[in-house]
Amino acid sequence: MILTQEQQAILDGAKGETMAKVMKTLVMYGDAFEAEKLVPVTSKYNHLVTSFGLKVMSPVYDLMQQLLDAGVASGQQFSVDPRPLDKNVPANFLQNLIFNKFMYTKQDFYEKQLKELGLMSDDAFTCTCYMDEMGNKPQKGDVLSWAESSAVVYANSVLGARCNRNSGIIDIMGSIVGYVPYFGLLTDEGRKATWVVKVNTSKKPEAQLLGSAIGMKVMEDVPYVVGLDKWIGTELNDAACAYLKDFGAATASNGAVGLYHIENLTPEAVELGEKLIAEGAREYIIDDAELERVQSEYPVIWKNPDAKPKLCFVGCPHLSLEQLKDWTVNVEAALAKSGKKKVVIPTVFTAAPKVLEAFNKTEFAPRLKATGIITSYICPLMYMNNPLCKTMPVITSSNKLRTYTSAKYYKDSQILDIITQGGAAQ
């Protein structure tokens, strides 16, 4: 790797031993991927993936304290992934005991470290930092030092920023030193599609299911998706962005996609079209039967596969303001149809704190509350890490949550039926 004089000086200790270690870490990271150089981080803010104060993560706290003691602060303020706990989310006495006494015992301590290091605000906790309400939306062409997979794929694909799928802690190091290794999705060549995915469905495909199918097929490669604009349009409006948020999260968690292109819709696809397709790109055709096959092959790891669900999570990644409004209308209509006033299964809709703040100012908030739905800023995945929670029959419309936990996946329409009508989850 070729370093500039300034970068070499930092590596040699010109800004202190701690900063030299940070630079060495990034250089070693770049060398592992044969990066030719380091390039400046240009976004206004950073975003960190590590938001949870797990007791076992003492090396993280030790590292953060070393940075603080050395007077090394982040070069950018940052947002961070969702908090793991919320007293409003259903949990029994034993589950809460595990949460508070054995799992997230360092949460307050860690949040204090984050604030000292450069946290944007007390409510800057979400996996969807790019929402307008959160104030951390990168610009097209910005070079980022992010790690949260669903945020990275959204920033790359929908916003046209540039970021590799970094690991946790690498994200803050890139922000501290102000540089990241130049390889992969930061390069023009690395952003070319090596798969052409043709969507030939008879109706609008479920975002989480389509993303899952593509992620499992292409893995870490870049797909160029043809035919999806027929169903979600050619304008990046609220509805399209919400769809792509959920779609991208599934490609990133069910596979390892860090960037996708949607023909006639995403910025680079609009600008460059088929020039984005690499020579020799493979093809994957998705029709109704393929989506049915993908969903039918998801494993169910509940002790009793036919158990009645005890909890439902919607919003992983966090819901947008428009999604909260749409869900309110849909839940009301489904309850009216079933002749019920409230949902029959405890259900939690999760969203960013500032999105929830905006939602609570609308007419929809009291209407949703009247249905029995709980709103929360929590990370459902962190909730499901509790060994007493992971044994519960939990359902979700998130393919990310399904992949990382014991939660069972259903399409949005199926979730709606289950939470308003009850019965076993078939």
Image (tube, rainbow, N blue to C red):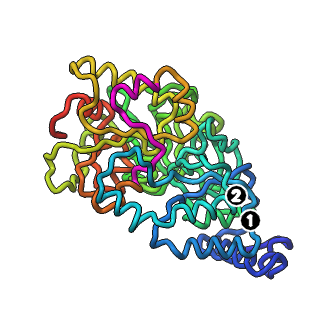
Quarter of the figure with residue 343? top left
Mark 2 is on which residue type? Gly
User: Could you say which is closer to the camera, residue 374 or residue 379?
Assistant: 374
Q: Residue at x 69, y 74 (%)?
A: 22
363 in magenta: no
Would you name the residue on which mark 2 appears? Answer: 118
370 in magenta: yes
Range covered by the magenta-colored residues: 365-381
- The secondary element bearing badge 1 is classed as loop
Quarter of the figure with residue 211? top left
| Left or right of 344 on screen, residue 396 | right
Compared to residue 94, the image places residue 28 above or below, namely: below
Give me the C-alpha separation between circle 2 and circle 1: 7 Å
- Whole-percent x, y for residue 300 in the image: 21, 52
Would you name the residue on which mark 1 appears? Answer: 73
Mark 1 is on which residue type? Ala
Callout 2 crowding tier (Cα within 10 Å): few <14, some 14–19, many ≥20: some
Quarter of the figure with residue 101? bottom left
- Whole-percent x, y for residue 139 in the image: 70, 42
Q: Residue at x 51, y 66 (%)?
A: 106
Instruction: Please report whichever mark, 2 or 1, sits nearer to the chain's N-terminal start.
Output: 1
Compared to residue 26, the image places residue 171 above or below, namely: above
Q: Residue at x 28, y 55 (%)?
A: 406
Task: Say whether residue 251 is visible.
Answer: no
**Disc 2 and disc 1 in contact, CB within 8 angstroms:** yes
- Whole-percent x, y for residue 338 in the image: 21, 21
Q: Residue at x 76, y 71 (%)?
A: 71
Task: Say whether residue 156 is visible.
Answer: yes
